[in-house]
Image (tube, grey):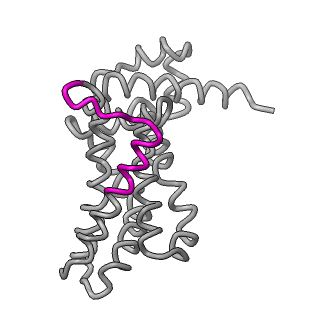
Amino acid sequence: MTRPSEITRERILNAAERLFADRGYEATSVRAIVAKARVNQAAINYHFAGKEGLYREVLRTAFRALTEHQLGHAEEAMAMSAEKALNQFVRHQLRPLLARDDLSRHIRIFNWEAVRPTAVFRKLVSEEAVPFMGLAIDLVRRFMPKADQRTLTTAAIWLIGQCSVFVRNREQLAAPPISFVLDEAAVEKLASLVTRWAVSGLAQPA
């Protein structure tokens, strides 16, 4: 049975996630969160020790939602051929292009961080990104077995960037003049193209 305190905590998180996605961290007040969640400020302080702690938890939830599937299936991916594993990685990175729910809000929160980075985000990334970057580095190493660590890290960042440029700019790409179609077939084709181009790029001598 779910306890009332857990329900309150979840309600605060849901309200905060929506407001941070719409307004960003700085423009979202505790008063607005309290009003949307229908709680008092003491509840935010009790569960999250204030706005910064609440934002950290929203960011952690968002980051894990975007990475936990791949981290949880890392061993399966390593058992695949290098190109198939790369295609699966790319497809999952492009998955938010089809999202219209929580993942969509997560991307919008990260978009705010791209233009108005916070100390909370920088610290969280330093803590949470290590396993995911390790996964990406292990993947590109299969194409560049003789590359040094710096080159592998650069290649992993480049690979992630090939996907994130589409995800971050999803709304602009879907609007005129580009009018990018964002359905299952289009995203699948995009994943295949990015995979093919990435294979060609990673195969080049470092």
Q: Nearer the viewer, residue 92 or 154?
A: 92
Magenta segment: 176-193
Q: Quadrant of the C terminus?
A: bottom left
Tell me if residue 161 comes above or below residue 60 in the rendering: below
Q: In the rendered image of this protein, does residue 78 appear above or below residue 166?
A: below
Q: Is residue 195 left or right of residue 49?
A: left
Q: Residue at x 74, y 30 (%)?
A: 3
How far across and how far down the image is residue 146, in percent?
Answer: 27, 88
User: Residue 152 vs residue 35: left or right?
Assistant: left
> Is residue 44 shown left or right of residue 160?
right
In the picture, which quadrant includes the N terminus?
top right
Of residues 128 and 111, the one drawn nearer to the viewer in this rendering: 111
Residue 192: percent from left, percent from top: 38, 57
Displayed quadrant of residue 25: top left
Q: Residue at 29% across / 49% down in the picture?
A: 122
- Extreme-bottom residue of the structure: 146
Residue 190 part of the magenta-drawn span:
yes
Number of marks in picture: 0
Image spot of residue 49 (x, y percent): 47, 34
- The residue at the point 35 percent across, 49 percent down is 190
Is residue 44 magenta-colored? no
Residue at screen point 55% across, 30% down: 46
Quadrant position of residue 86: bottom left
Extreme residue in the right direction: 1
